[in-house]
């Protein structure tokens, strides 16, 4: 009589076989990640990020006096808090993904953390873009609902501003050239932050994976 092997037990057996040969990073049967665990990790990461962001805003409003604090220091503090919140959120998200997915294999844990990072970053970028498009759409709708005279005045004002900007083009180019070092520094900081967040998600996934239990039958006793 043929025995039916449960898919979950089959996946766990495949991970234990990969553990027996750690030198083979990619096995012939492939790496089977738990998409349920990845989805859970992403949801936990986003929820924790929003919670930490709200906590940072509350602490900032309570403890900081805008009249006595420089804007540059406020911006630096907000940036540091946002970066730390992102690292913590993705670390916990990676840990939850492998814990929920009952992952034993280190290779599977690596890809689980990587996928948690990718999906989380894409969702945050989508939410940011959706918010910007909603604001732009609301402004356009407000402009369209105004009387024709108001629309003509607004259009004339925009044309005047465009002409002024065109006349100031050389000055704007000079300002842009002066701000290039700062923009370059900000771009590299953003890249380093994304790389650190990737490391946080992968490390969290590695720490969250379950350790394979050693059965007496496997030791030959």
Image (cartoon, rainbow, N blue to C red):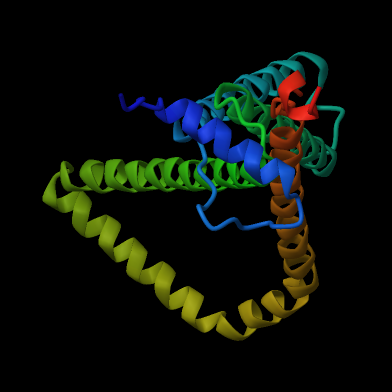
Q: Nearer the viewer, residue 175 or 49?
A: 49
The x, y position of residue 208, in whole percent, is 71, 27
Residue 215 visible in rendering: no
Seen at 66% across and 32% down, the residue is 104
Seen at 54% across and 48% down, the residue is 31
Q: Nearer the viewer, residue 204 or 78?
A: 204
The x, y position of residue 5, in whole percent, is 40, 27
Residue 191's place in the image compared with 145, above or below, is: below
Left or right of 54? Residue 71 is right
Residue 55 visible in rendering: yes
Task: Give the quarter of the figure containing the N terminus.
Answer: top left
Residue 89's place in the image compared with 152, above or below, is: above
Task: Give the quarter of the figure containing the C terminus.
Answer: top right
Seen at 29% across and 65% down, the residue is 156
Quarter assignment of residue 181: bottom right
Q: Nearer the viewer, residue 177 or 53?
A: 53
Left or right of 93? Residue 160 is left
The x, y position of residue 21, in whole percent, is 73, 49
Quarter assignment of residue 139: top left
Count of marks placed on residues? 0
Residue 122's place in the image compared with 78, above or below, is: below
The x, y position of residue 27, in whole percent, is 59, 55
């Amino acid at each position: 009589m043929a025995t039916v092997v449960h898919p979950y037990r089959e996946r766990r057996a495949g991970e234990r076989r990969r553990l027996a040969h750690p030198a083979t990073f990619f096995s012939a049967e492939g790496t089977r990640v738990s998409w349920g665990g990845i989805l859970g990790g992403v949801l936990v990461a986003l929820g924790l990020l929003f919670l930490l962001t709200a906590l940072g805003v509350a602490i900032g409003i309570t403890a900081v006096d805008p009249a006595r604090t420089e804007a540059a220091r406020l911006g630096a503090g907000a940036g540091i808090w946002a970066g730390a919140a992102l690292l913590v959120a993705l670390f916990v998200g990676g840990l939850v993904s492998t814990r929920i997915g009952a992952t034993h294999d280190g290779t599977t844990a690596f890809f689980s953390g990587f996928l948690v990072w990718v999906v989380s970053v894409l969702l945050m970028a989508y939410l940011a873009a959706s918010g910007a498009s909603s604001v732009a759409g609301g402004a356009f709708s407000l402009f369209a609902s105004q009387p024709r005279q108001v629309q003509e005045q607004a259009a004339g004002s925009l044309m005047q501003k465009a002409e002024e900007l065109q006349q100031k083009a050389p000055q704007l180019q000079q300002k842009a050239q002066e701000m290039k070092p700062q923009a370059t520094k900000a771009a590299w900081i953003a890249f380093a932050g994304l790389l650190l967040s990737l490391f946080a998600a992968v490390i969290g996934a590695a720490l969250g994976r379950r350790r394979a239990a050693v059965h007496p039958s496997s030791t030959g006793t």
